[in-house]
Image (cartoon, rainbow, N blue to C red):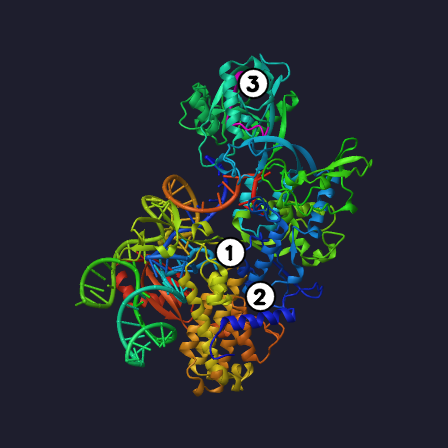
RNA sequence: GCCGGAGUGGCGAAAUCGGUAUACGCACCAGACUCAAAAUCUGGCGAGAGCAAUCUCAUGUCGGUUCGAGUCCGACCUCCGGCACCA
């Protein structure tokens, strides 16, 4: 241990040692309890950003914590290395996507090693390598076999000028990213995976994981799946083409059917197609307008006004026999449900708005129970708003007077009997489209033969490898379609000339099962050996951004169930618990005059006397600058390069800071001054240990002697031991509940107490030195998850063992609850709920004792004098509240 | 627009079970050490009133439940995430 703390030196030393000793390599061992700590797979952009640092620091802290508890910890990493940026770089800069990706991975791997995250590098995987994507293809074929993969027509963003498919990002703002041409939607055949077959199971499985997953994530998934129980009802159409004699709607509220004032269909509904020639000019124009509007990429910001047009057709309400108009509305989507709805304005908000706008009749058929009588006598009541609750039916023939729930049941049965409808369950969830018209992804292993049709590539011919390169023009068909040697192939069935599928898979496919692959990363025959996965899986803690709450996490839950059904695993939920971390944000400065983001060093921040930011100006010309806190990015000049931070402050300080600064779930505002506090803390620990090193080495007192000294020990030592053991309890509790910021605060407090209570090492008695030794060792072991290099170095100095903390038997300290007990606690005394005084008592003091102590208190009598004590509430060990009148 | 969150000192935050609001850190102020500075150490630090003891107010806003609300309930405001081809 050097006289001064040199982070770089310590970190280099231990990173080398860890690699040599294989400290973080894990092997399945049925005799040991495993712990699977997983962080979300990064996209190899080339540079680590603070979000990564945060994600991996959290994971590594927990991995260390579990190792210190004797768990067999697996903590792997890999690369989500397929995807758009590599292909974008190929188009823009002419680089080879494979080389570009490999370079990025090398850079980021080096950065991760500098950070000292304890990964098992022998398990590293990368999605773009054939040995990995072979099994994307393998899974696809398995799903095809099971009927879980199928092809259908579906829309893509299309640039008519570049004649190419665009991602939503490339089509943002409704125009092509390269040429600015307005983007259209175009239909083409694409492959889908039947996630909807697992919709109910995805809902049911939530119960199993509800303890470990944030409720908000499960709620979001629940809403995304959007299960609704209801009924299909067919409405006969009068006066239209015989091609489409009726329209089917789905409703969850069949009980409101006597209030239907119209049928509203989507512009793309077959009824519209079938009758388009008989429609008036006005209707035809509206249809076209709505279709054009719906063909543009969705702009979520813009509020779409409800629009519609009466087709002139009529539908017959099968319950009442009433004739109602058929409308076309822009708020009805062909892709959702049946593409037609029954409009019940009195009981649905959207229908209400629509009816108000077009002056359609609004008839109330559900009433609040206490108003039923009025509704039976009056025809209708002018409604202010739609009444969407369930209630009692009115004006509904035989069903009048029935409660909604009963009516829904019997009306559905009636529709089934009369064969114009049936009960049904629908989902908002749609099947997962996995086709991408791109090069940089896993090829879909399908061959199209003019004679045999769609033929799967035989499983023993996998992988279908991507060619070395392709023409990357950004124009025309996917680059892969232009590589003849790839496209032209013999049909596996008839041997005739055939063509390969040139679409590749969505990169979400790669990330659905990567953490299963970590269990057995070099398997050539199977995605993983079931026995390996059986040991390591499921994941004990999965850590990643909240932005993945729905899609990735739903896909991967689905994939797990699919893998269970093909016999690879015997469970259906891949992760026991989930921690969603917040974003890392930084202050950004936008100059209105320059219309661009400017560098922080060019900005002068103005504050009021209290220190609040009131504004900012550009140093050069004193023009105003807008200050915001936004997600870090290069273009906003508010990013921080982790490498810079590490070289200035050291990896340990960076890690301590990101974990200390905010709870993992919160947004983290990057402030460089904060990290200096982290370094200062480490340096204080270093100096303290250095000062005491000699004294604690010569301290002969063992733990037993310490215990024997008991109450005979000097007060300072007793106080220090109490603080040490209280800290152990706190840190443990916090870790177990997923709090990573508060343990650091607790450790800082412990260090402060050590300073206050330790005294001078030269004058310390054996018992005192032993108490200090206990504090130091506990502190180091508890700090190791945050600052592993630092703690390894200090541990080596105090223990004399250079094999590393875990290998030399270092374990998380155990708390002695007796030692942690306070002699005396402060009890708050309130009068009528307001804090008036404090009394001191033993933590075990009985309620009656606390009550009399409180009532005897001078301050309390001041407030109770002349009044009657109505009630005294005592919370043991906390407070006494005297209620007077 | 739909779905899901979050708002506590100058700043990051703590209080996890309805029980002493502001632990810990940053910034700032004062002092010690120093020729000086840095580093380090000591002390102060929500707002207002008061010489002081102390009192009043304060957890986005408004209202409610309770002996007691940052915490529970209702309405609102602001900001953030997701919305199926960024990952």
Q: Position of residue A487 (x, y in %)?
A: 72, 39
A585 or A634: nearer the viewer: A634
Q: What element carries label 2?
A: helix
Q: Which chain carries label 1?
A: A
Residue in view at x 63 percent, y 47 percent: A557
Q: Mark 2 lies on which chain?
A: A
Q: Is mark 3 on a helix, strand or loop?
A: loop
The mark found on residue A429 in the picture is none
For the C terminus of chain A, the quadrant is bottom left
Q: Position of residue A596 (x, y in %)?
A: 39, 46
Compute the Cα span from label 1 to label 3: 60 Å
Q: Which chain carries label 3?
A: A
- Front of the two marks 2 and 1: 1
Q: What stretch is highlighted in magenta?
A: A322-337
How many tags in the picture? 3
A165 or A672: nearer the viewer: A165
Q: Specify whether residue A638 is painted magenta.
A: no
Instruction: Left or right? Give the position of A741 relative to B26.
Output: right
Residue on which disc 3 sits: A317
Q: Position of residue B74 (x, y in %)?
A: 41, 41
Q: Which of marks 2 and 1 is nearer the N terminus?
A: 1
Residue on which disc 2 sits: A64
Residue on which disc 1 sits: A49
Q: Is mark 1 on a helix, strand or loop?
A: loop
């Amino acid at each position: 241990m050097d006289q001064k703390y040199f982070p770089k030196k310590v970190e280099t030393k231990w990173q080398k040692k860890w690699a040599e000793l294989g400290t973080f390599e894990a092997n399945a061992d049925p005799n040991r309890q495993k712990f699977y700590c997983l962080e979300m797979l990064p996209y190899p952009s080339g540079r680590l950003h603070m979000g990564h640092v945060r994600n991996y620091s959290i994971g590594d802290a927990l991995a260390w914590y579990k190792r210190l508890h004797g768990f067999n910890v697996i903590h792997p990493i890999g690369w989500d290395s397929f995807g758009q940026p590599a292909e974008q770089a190929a188009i823009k800069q002419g680089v080879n996507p494979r080389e570009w990706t490999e370079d990025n991975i090398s850079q980021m791997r080096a950065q991760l090693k500098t950070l000292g995250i304890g990964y098992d590098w022998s398990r590293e995987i990368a999605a773009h390598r054939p040995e990995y994507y072979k099994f994307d293809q393998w899974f696809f074929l398995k799903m095809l076999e099971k009927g879980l993969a199928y092809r259908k027509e579906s829309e893509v963003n299309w640039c008519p000028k570049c004649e190419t498919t665009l991602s939503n990002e490339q089509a943002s703002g409704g125009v092509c990213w390269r040429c600015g041409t307005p983007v259209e939607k175009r239909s083409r055949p694409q492959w889908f995976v039947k996630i909807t077959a697992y919709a109910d199971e995805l809902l049911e499985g939530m119960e199993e994981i509800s303890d470990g997953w944030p409720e908000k994530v499960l709620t979001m998934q629940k809403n995304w799946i959007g299960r609704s129980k209801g009924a299909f009802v067919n409405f006969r159409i009068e006066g239209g083409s015989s091609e489409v004699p009726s329209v089917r709607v789905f409703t969850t509220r069949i009980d409101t059917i006597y209030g239907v004032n119209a049928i509203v269909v989507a512009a793309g509904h077959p009824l519209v197609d079938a009758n388009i020639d008989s429609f008036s000019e006005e209707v035809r124009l509206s249809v076209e307008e709505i279709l054009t509007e719906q063909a543009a990429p969705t702009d979520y910001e813009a509020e779409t006004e409800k629009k519609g047009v009466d087709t002139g057709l009529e539908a017959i309400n099968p319950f009442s026999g009433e004739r109602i108009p058929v409308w076309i509305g822009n708020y009805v989507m062909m892709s959702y449900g049946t593409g037609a709805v029954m409009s019940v304005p009195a009981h649905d908000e959207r229908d209400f708005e629509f009816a108000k706008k077009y002056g359609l009749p609004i008839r109330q058929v559900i009433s609040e129970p206490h108003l039923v009588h009025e509704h039976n006598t009056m025809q209708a009541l002018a409604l202010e708003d739609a009444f969407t609750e369930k209630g009692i039916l009115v004006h509904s023939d035989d069903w009048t007077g029935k409660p909604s729930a009963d009516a829904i049941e019997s009306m559905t049965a009636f529709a089934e009997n009369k064969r114009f409808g049936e009960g049904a369950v629908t989902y908002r969830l749609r099947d997962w489209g996995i086709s991408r018209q791109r090069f940089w992804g896993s090829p879909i292993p399908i061959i199209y033969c003019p004679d045999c049709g769609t033929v799967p590539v035989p499983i023993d011919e996998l992988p279908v490898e991507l060619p070395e390169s392709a023409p990357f023009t950004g124009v025309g068909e996917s680059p892969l379609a232009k590589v003849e040697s790839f496209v032209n192939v013999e049909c596996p069935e008839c041997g005739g000339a055939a063509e390969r599928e040139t679409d590749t898979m969505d990169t979400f496919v790669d990330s659905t099962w990567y953490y299963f692959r970590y269990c057995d990363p070099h398997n050539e025959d199977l995605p993983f050996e079931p026995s390996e996965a059986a040991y390591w899986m499921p994941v004990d803690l999965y850590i990643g951004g909240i932005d993945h709450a729905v899609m990735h996490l739903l896909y991967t839950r689905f994939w797990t169930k699919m893998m269970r059904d093909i016999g690879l695993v015997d469970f259906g939920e891949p992760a026991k618990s989930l921690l969603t971390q917040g974003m890392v944000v930084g202050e950004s400065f936008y100059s209105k005059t320059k219309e661009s983001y400017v560098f922080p060093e060019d900005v002068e921040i103005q504050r009021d006397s209290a220190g609040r930011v009131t504004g900012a100006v550009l140093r050069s010309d004193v023009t105003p600058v807008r200050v915001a806190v936004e997600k870090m990015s290069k273009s906003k000049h508010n990013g921080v390069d982790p490498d810079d931070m590490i070289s200035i402050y050291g990896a340990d300080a960076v890690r301590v800071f990101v974990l200390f600064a905010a709870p993992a779930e919160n947004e983290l505002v990057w402030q460089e001054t904060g990290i200096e506090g982290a370094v200062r803390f480490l340096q204080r620990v270093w100096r303290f240990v250095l000062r005491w090193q000699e004294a604690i080495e010569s301290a002969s007192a063992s733990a037993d002697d310490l215990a024997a000294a008991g109450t005979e020990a000097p007060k300072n030592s007793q106080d220090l031991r109490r603080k040490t053991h209280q800290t152990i309890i706190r840190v443990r509790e916090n870790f177990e509940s997923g709090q990573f910021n508060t343990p650091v605060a607790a450790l800082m407090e412990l260090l402060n107490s050590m300073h206050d209570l330790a005294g001078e090492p030269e004058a310390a008695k054996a018992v005192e030195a032993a108490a200090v030794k206990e504090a130091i060792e506990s502190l180091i072991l508890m700090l190791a998850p945050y600052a592993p290099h630092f703690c390894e170095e200090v541990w080596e100095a105090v223990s004399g063992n250079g094999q590393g903390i875990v290998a030399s038997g270092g374990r998380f300290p155990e708390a002695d609850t007796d030692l942690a007990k306070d002699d005396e606690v402060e009890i708050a005394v309130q009068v009528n709920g307001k804090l008036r005084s404090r009394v001191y008592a033993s933590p075990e003091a009985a309620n009656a004792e606390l009550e009399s102590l409180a009532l005897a208190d001078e301050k309390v009598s001041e407030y109770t004098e002349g009044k009657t004590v109505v009630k005294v509430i005592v919370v043991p060990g906390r407070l006494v509240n005297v209620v007077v009148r």
